[in-house]
Amino acid sequence: MNLTSLFNKKPYEIGIALSGGGVKGLCHAGVLKALEEQGIVPDIISGVSAGSLVGALYADGYSPDEIAVLFEDINFRNMTKIRIPDGGFFKTDIFQKFLDEKLRAKTFGELNIPLRVVATNLDQGQSVVFSSGNLIDPIVASCTFPVLFSPKLIDGVHYVDGGVLKNFPVSTIRNDCEKVIGVNASPIVADKYKQSIINVATRSYHFMFKANMLYDKELCDLLIEPVDMGNYDTFDVDKGREIFDLGYRTTKQLLVNKLDTSVV
């Protein structure tokens, strides 16, 4: 055995990085299901926004199919719909209650799989990675889409969506993993869109998010990026099962083509 490789061995064999993307993040669960069927289970997960939610549920012991059912729950779907002119903003207290009820683990240390959650420090303009202590507050912070959500206050600091500065958190685990699988649920397709406040806002943010994803995409050993995901809107809550199935089918096909690679 090469002693150099022994001493340089990284702490985790396989890591998986889950991007943001609103309800499109449900494709992550479909991807995880396809990976499981090939015996691939991550040793560590990094997630931002919707990716942090799916990652937390999976690390907490929920199966991919169970995660899909949670997203289809009528209360969750109502919670994630924007109503204008009822205010037009998500209520983070409702989302926080959902997490309190569904997550068995209340701290990072209680999870079955190590998890890193990325949020944006709005006060200092910095990307921050949470990996210990309270679990629920960082997830809420990571999912706090600017303007639509009020910033999440943690220890006197205001946080918003981690995707503002890092929508694809591959670099947060790259140095600790032998192999990294990256799942991008937010490929940008410059297609037609409705001229509404919500659509213009989310489209603008997505173009911004795309710019900060390029570096991290290059860091993946295996990149899973369902192209047809561009046909769905961030808040297309009624299309959850379609999105889940798209992530599953894309990954199944990709793995068929990659079975002879070192990742699998």
Image (cartoon, grey):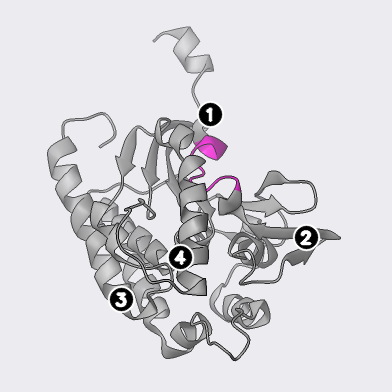
Assign a secondary structure to mark 3: helix
| Cβ–Cβ under 8 Å for marks 3 and 2 | no
Relative depth, front residue between 184 and 148: 148
Q: Amino acid at mark 1?
A: Asn
Amino acid at pointer 2: His
Alpha-carbon span between mark 2 and mark 4: 30 Å
Viewer-nearest of labels 1 and 4? 1
User: What is the secondary structure assignment of the residue under circle 2?
Assistant: strand
Q: What residue did someone put label 4 on?
A: 61
The quadrant of the image that shows the N terminus is top left
Q: Tell me how far mark 1 sits from mark 3, CA to CA.
A: 36 Å
The answer for how far apart the CA atoms under marks 3 and 4 are is 24 Å
Query: Which residue is labeled 1 in the image?
Result: 175
Residue 238 image-quadrant placement: bottom left
Amino acid type indicated by mark 4 = Gly
Neighbor class of circle 2 (other Cα within 10 Å; few <14, some 14-19, many 20+) is: some
Query: Any magenta on residue 228?
Result: no
Q: Which residues are magenta?
A: 165-173
Q: Which mark is residue 152?
A: none
Could you say where residue 225 lies in the image, as x and y percent from the top left?
A: 30, 48
> Residue at left 54%, top 59%?
49
- Whether tag 2 and tag 4 are in contact, CB under 8 A, the answer is no
> SS of the residue at dot 1?
loop
Q: Is residue 144 left or right of residue 9?
A: right
Q: Is residue 235 visible?
A: yes
The correct choice, above or below, for 227 with respect to 194 in the image is above
> Where residue 256 sits: x, y (%)?
13, 43
Residue 114 picture location, percent across and down = 55, 49
